[in-house]
Image (cartoon, rainbow, N blue to C red):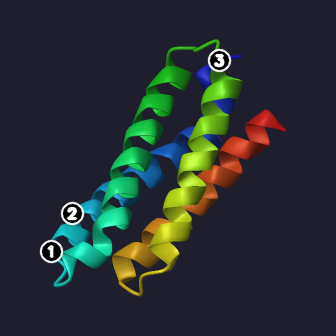
Amino acid sequence: MSHEQYQSVLEALHECMVACNHCYDACLKEENINMMAECIRLDRECAEICAYLEQAISRGTPFISELTQVCATICEACGSECKKHQHEHCQKCAEACLKCADACRKLTA
């Protein structure tokens, strides 16, 4: 399959990566940074896997099924953590993460 057939998941991956990077940066500026530690850690994990998978799909990886499963798991973990925080950047990140997890799961279904 060509990467054009994966356009919706590529868009979700990119949006999630951008949201996680923004959330990561914003969390570092929050007053109680210790409370944000897990959110920050998962933002990094999620942004990295989304960026990697976006690149892997665009070059035609033969491991799409395995990678999308891992990505969905990480995106769900990040989305669940971000939902716990009331900051707008966390809520937007949670939404992007859960959307991306759904898009990845649809590829492996």
Within 10 Å of disc 2 (Cα), the crowding (few <14, some 14-19, many 20+) is some
Disc 1 + disc 2, Cβ < 8 Å: yes
Mark yes or no: residue 36 visible.
yes
Task: Measuring from the top left, give residue 103's x and y in whole percent.
Answer: 68, 48
Q: Residue furthest right?
A: 109
Q: Quadrant of residue 37?
A: bottom left
Q: Would you name the residue on which mark 3 appears?
A: 2
Q: Is residue 23 visible?
A: no
Distance between the alpha carbons at the discs numbered 1 and 2: 7 Å
Q: On screen, 58 above or below 77? A: above
| Residue type, mark 3 in image | Ser
Residue highlighted by disc 2:
25
Mark number displayed over residue 52: none
Looking at the image, is 16 positioned above or below residue 58? below
**Where does residue 73 sit, x and y in percent of width and height?**
62, 47
Question: Foreground residue, 4 or 102?
Answer: 102
Quadrant containing the N terminus in the rendered view = top right
Q: What's the distance in space between the residues labelled 3 and 1, CA to CA?
A: 41 Å
Q: Is residue 36 left or right of residue 109?
A: left
Mark carried by residue 29: 1
Residue 88 pos. (x, y %): 37, 82
Query: Residue at the spot x=28%, y=61% of the render?
Result: 24
**83 and 10: which one is in front?**
83
Residue 66's spot in the image, x, y percent? 67, 26
**Total number of numbered labels?**
3
Q: Earlier in the sequence, mark 3 or mark 2?
A: 3
